[in-house]
Amino acid sequence: MPFELIALAPLLPLLATALVAAWHIFGAPGGDAAEARTVRLLSYAMLGSLAVLLAMDARALLYGAPGEIVLGTWFAAGGIQIPVSFMIDALSLPFATLIAVIGYIALKFSANYLHRERGFHRFFIINGLFLTGMLMLVLSGNIVLSFVGWEIVGVSSYLLIGYAFERTVATGSAVRAFVTNRIGDAGFILAIALTLHYFDSFAWSGLGAAAISTGTVSVSLVALGFVVAALAKSAQVPFTPWITRALEGPTPSSAIFYGSLMVHAGVYLILRLEPVLVQAPLLLVLIAVAGLVTALYGWFGGLVQSDVKSALLFGTLTQIGIMFVTIGFGAFDVAAWHMCLHATFRAWQFLSAPSYMHAVKGASVEVPPWLGRSQRWYTAILERFWLERFGDALLTLPMQDLGRDMRLFDERIVSRMLGAPGDSEFSPHRQNRLVRGRGVAGALLEWCAANLYRLEQHLLMGTEGGPTRRTLRALSEYLAVLESMLEQPRYLILLILIIFIAGM
């Protein structure tokens, strides 16, 4: 099998996802038969991807991994050219194969776990999109295509955290994850721009040689954007709070997102950057420190968890923190083995969590004696060192306030300019206002709106008729008299004579 067929690995689940989505958009019949069809189509697609990857593994073992495979050009403008390329090496192939195996198992598990649930097909559509994004992220041969997969994974995560969108807690947790990961995405985009500026190439295979011939400061700037993206995606301190709220989604999504696959995407990105990071030792120190702090945070947090999924999540944070420490000390191969082994084991634990919860129902959780004797430590750990509140105050709440202000501006200003109907909320006499301006800008807009409303009331809407309304009413009366006169023949003939004389 030629290596060029590696493109089928992400393409098959994408096509299956699109087909399932089209069926249900255009009103396919529901019921158990529709569920079986959805599961069967996506499962066969993942089996197809797994077969392709296993064939690639066998061919790579026999003939060696070819590295970058270029299939064509995706985008070209001026001197910028982005190819459709895939990376086939000792890092991408094993992890992609593991993604296909875990993805297939999670799909089969979900068929029974979510049977007759509301949003059954929506879950599978998002899940198929996620698996497509993961395979694209891991197998892409250049950083731009990797970013496409990175974004697909992030959007899928947001949608599945808010799977139960009728629950405020679920949607709030989804917003936390979305806002925090946008910081990482900004770092990734900055890194892409700096890579083009300093390295003049987007290919993963060319970064090592470009980094050697570039100054340390420039290499550090390029790598820093990728490191920020990796820390955010893998929920390392200070970006940790979003993942502790991400368990609002169904258990299968927790297994493949935050137990085994997506949470390791940041680790994979750092491993892929090995040729660049060895030229930026200060960033390796930063990675090691962030990993150490996260490992301690996860260990302490796991001591007080009474829910098995939360305990597993904090265990995941600890293990990924250790991976970052390992990378920081330069042991990239050890971190890669740790990543694959941990992903396998943690996926099994998360998928087994519902059965375990039923088995130990009502069991008490004991904290270590030293922690039970220290009220301050126990409170700090129970509050997760207040990192979530800090993250909310710094990131989530400002973004939510900005969204509300934009919505109010749309409702109060734009809708009024377009003449959209609605009750006025600018009236100073209204006692129960639904919304209020926030901050200096909000207060200024509210003051302007209230005074414009008073002016409108004075000119047009007065009880006896404002001056503008009275003027318009008198003018309309004069025009009505003039119209009635023109309807009489003698005045019409007189008007024609006047126009005729004026024309002479």
Image: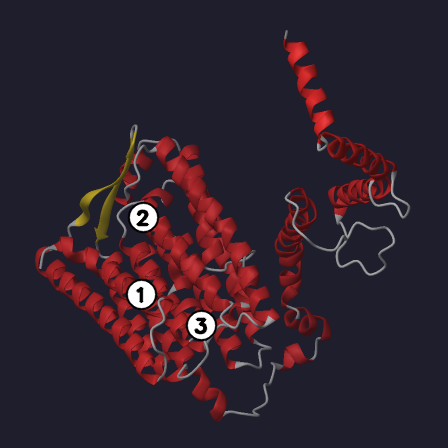
Quadrant of image for the C terminus: top right
Q: Name the spot of residue 95 as percent of width and height, x first.
A: 28, 62
Which residue occupies the foreground of this view, 452 or 476?
476
Task: Note whether 218 is above or below 61 in the view shown.
Answer: above
Indicate which label's residue lies in the foreground, 2 or 1: 1
Decide if residue 455 is in sight here.
Answer: yes
Distance from label 3 to label 1 (Cα)? Answer: 20 Å
User: For numbered disc 3, what is the local secondary structure?
Assistant: helix
- Contact? badges 3 and 1 (CB < 8 Å): no
| Residue 417, picture quadrant | top right
Q: Circle 3 is placed at which residue position?
A: 254
- For badge 1, the amino acid type reads Thr
**Disc with the residue nearer the chain's start (3 vs 1):** 1
- In the visual, does 38 lie left or right of 478? left
Distance from label 3 to label 2 (Cα)? Answer: 25 Å
- In the visual, does 40 lie left or right of 412? left
Residue at the image position 39 percent from the left and 84 percent from the top: 115
- For badge 3, the amino acid type reads Ser
Decide if residue 284 is in sight here.
Answer: no
Label total for image: 3
Q: Circle 1 is placed at which residue position?
A: 17
Distance from label 2 to label 1 (Cα)? Answer: 19 Å
Q: Circle 2 is placed at which residue position?
A: 145
Residue at the image position 31 percent from the left and 72 percent from the top: 102
- For badge 2, the amino acid type reads Leu
Residue lying farthest to the front in this orientation: 490
Which residue occupies the foreground of this view, 7 or 421?
421
